[in-house]
Image (cartoon, grey):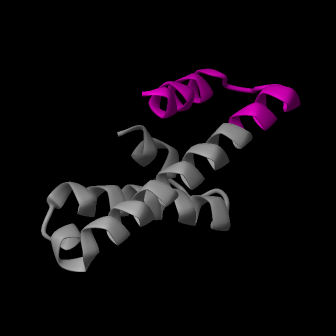
């Protein structure tokens, strides 16, 4: 819920100041790393077959992958809208 709230607040600030932008960048990095670690723990705990048989795990993997790609590549068109979903 906090990640969603942070993304909503970020979209509401049209031209954030540098300090607000830095806070949102730090929050984005924190949540991406936290969810990636959660996904890795889930994969390790459930092993590959049990992990792959649950559709929610696939959804989590897609969301985390999009977040990781957006951190590495930078500004991709449509990623912010996709991350709000």
Classified by dominant secondary structure, the portion drawn in magenta counts as helix
Query: Observer-nearest residue: 64 or 85?
Result: 64
The residue that appears at 76% across and 32% down in the rendered structure is 23
- Compared with 51, 84 (above or below) is above
In the picture provided, is 75 more to the left or to the right than 83?
right
Q: Position of residue 56 (x, y in %)?
A: 21, 54
* Quarter of the figure with the N terminus: top left
Q: Which residues are magenta?
A: 1-24
Farthest residue toward the right?
Answer: 18
In the picture provided, is 12 more to the left or to the right than 48?
right
Q: Position of residue 43 (x, y in %)?
A: 34, 68
The residue that appears at 65% across and 66% down in the rendered structure is 72
- Compared with 25, 46 (above or below) is below
Query: Observer-nearest residue: 46 or 19?
Result: 46
Q: Position of residue 58 (x, y in %)?
A: 25, 63
* Quarter of the figure with the C terminus: top left
The residue that appears at 32% across and 66% down in the rendered structure is 45
In the picture provided, is 14 more to the left or to the right than 17?
left
Is residue 16 rendered magenta in the image? Answer: yes
Q: Position of residue 66 (x, y in %)?
A: 46, 60
- Compared with 30, 75 (above or below) is below
Query: Observer-nearest residue: 83 or 57?
Result: 57
* Figure quadrant of residue 15: top right
Is residue 45 rendered magenta in the image? Answer: no
Farthest residue toward the left?
Answer: 53
* Figure quadrant of residue 25: top right
Farthest residue toward the bottom?
Answer: 48
């Amino acid at each position: 819920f906090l990640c969603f709230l942070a993304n909503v607040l970020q979209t509401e600030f049209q031209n954030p100041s540098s300090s607000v932008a830095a806070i949102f960048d730090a929050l984005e990095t924190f949540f991406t790393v936290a969810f990636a670690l959660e996904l890795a723990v889930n994969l390790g705990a459930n092993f590959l077959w049990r992990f792959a048989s649950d559709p929610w795990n696939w959804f989590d993997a897609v969301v985390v992958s999009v977040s990781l790609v957006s951190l590495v590549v930078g500004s991709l068109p449509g990623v912010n809208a996709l991350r709000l979903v």
